[in-house]
Amino acid sequence: MIPVNRLADPVVRAFVTAVNTNDKAAFDATLSPGATMSDDGTDRDLMDWADKEIFSSNGHMDVESESEDGRSLVVDYRNDTYGTMRTTWQFTVEDGRVSRFETGQA
């Protein structure tokens, strides 16, 4: 596993930190206005998804690997609803914030 503080991209690092500390305000601060996301190839309402999949179910990301630029991760993701699953996360970062992320089972 890669320690969160060693993730290459600072914006992705802040995103993962916010998820792992269940800090909704910090999570929101990593996102650009109008940010979007998809889960298993289907676009979702980002805030509704985050509330359900992260904040109300104690989501946590253990990063297994990252791409050279740090914007693609393989993660053991766990929450109280689904347990642990191996997932991929791809981030689009613009102007220092996440404008889109895509996640799904690896």
Image: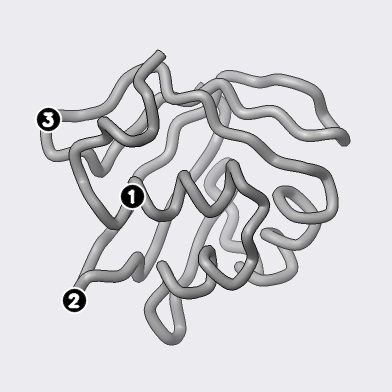
How far apart marks 3 and 2 lie (CA) works out to 20 Å
Q: Residues within 10 Å of mark 2 (few under 14, many from 20)?
A: few
Residue at x 53%, y 72% (from the top left corner): 28
What amino acid is found at the position of numbered circle 3 in the picture?
A: Glu
Residue 73's tag is none
The vertical placement of 30 against 53, above or below, is below
Mark 1 vs mark 2, CA separation in Å: 13 Å
The residue carrying pointer 1 sits among few (fewer than 14), some (14 to 19) or many (20 or more) residues within 10 Å by Cα, namely: many
Find residue 97 and report its horizontal and vertical position in percent: 30, 70
Q: Nearer the viewer, residue 21 or 95?
A: 21
The amino acid marked with disc number 2 is Asp
Q: Are marks 1 and 3 in contact (CB under 8 Å)?
A: no
Dot 2 corresponds to which residue?
95
* Vertical placement of residue 99 versus 14, above or below: below
Residue 65 figure quarter:
top left
- The residue type indicated by label 1 comes to Val
- What residue is rendered at 75% in x and 55% in y? 55
N-terminal of the two: label 3 or label 2? 3
Position of 58 compared to 60: left or right?
Answer: right
Residue drawn 70% across and 50% down? 54
> In this rendering, would 96 be left or right of 32?
left
* Residue contact at pointers 3 and 2, CB within 8 angstroms: no
Q: What is the number of the mark on residue 68? A: 3
Question: How far across and how far down the image is residue 21, in percent?
Answer: 61, 47
Per the image, label 2 sits on a secondary structure element best described as: loop
Residue tagged 1: 12
**Residue nearest the viewer, comparing 14 with 70:** 14
The residue positioned 70% from the left and 60% from the top of the image is 49
Outermost residue, bottom direction?
33
Location of residue 58 in the rendering, given as x and y in whole percent from the top left corner: 77, 42
Could you give the CA–CA distance between mark 1 and mark 3, rounded to whole angstroms?
13 Å
